[in-house]
Image (cartoon, rainbow, N blue to C red):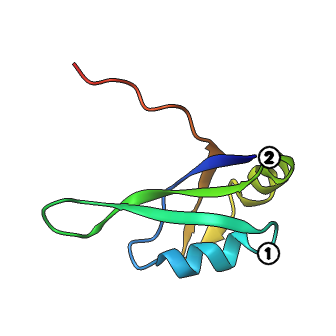
Amino acid sequence: MSKTLYVGNLPWSMSEEDISREFGRHAEVQSCRIITDRETGRSRGFGFVEVADEDAERVVQAMNGYSVGGRELVVNEARPRQGRF
C-alpha cells in the first residue's frame, strides 16, 4: 500500500523531477505530480508525492519545514478531496 502526501509552498521553478529527487533521499517515490493552473499551465505551488505506507511518517518528519529554493515546504498526509457544491 501507499500513502499520498500533500506538498505545499513549492517554489514556482521546481519540477516534478526535482521533487522526486528531494523526497527520494528519504524514501522511494512511487509517483509525484505538481498541480497546475488550467489556463496558464503554471504551477499552483503545491503537489502530491506518493510513498510506501511504512515510509510516510518518516518522510513527513524529514521534509516538513525543509527549505528548498528559499521556501519552507509544508508536508503532511493528504486528505480526501471534499466535494464541491
Q: Look at the numbered disc 2 and give the secondary structure of its residue.
A: helix
Q: How far apart are marks 1 and 2 (CA)?
A: 16 Å
Q: What mark, if any, has residue 53 been given in the picture?
A: 2
Q: In this rendered view, identify the residue nearer to me: 32 or 13.
A: 32
Q: Residue 4's spot in the image, x, y percent? A: 62, 48
Q: Position of residue 8 (x, y in %)?
A: 51, 53
Res 35 → quadrant: bottom left
Name the residue type under label 2.
Asp
> What secondary structure is marked by label 1?
loop
How many numbered marks appear?
A: 2
Dot label at residue 25? 1
Task: Please say if the residues under marks 1 and 2 sit with CB atoms less than 8 Å apart.
Answer: no
Residue 9 vs residue 4, the one in the foreground:
4
* Kind of residue at disc 1: Arg
| Numbered disc in front, either 1 or 2 | 2
Q: Residue at x 47, y 57 (%)?
A: 47
Q: Which of marks 1 and 2 is nearer the N terminus?
A: 1
- Which quadrant of the rendered structure holds the C terminus? top left
* Residue beneath the point at 26% across and 24% down: 84
Given residues 29 and 69, the one toward you in this image is 29
**Residue at figure coordinates x 57%, y 80% from the top left:** 18
Quadrant of the image occupied by residue 66: bottom right
Q: Is residue 75 left or right of residue 79?
A: right
Question: Where residue 85 is drawn, which disc sits there?
Answer: none
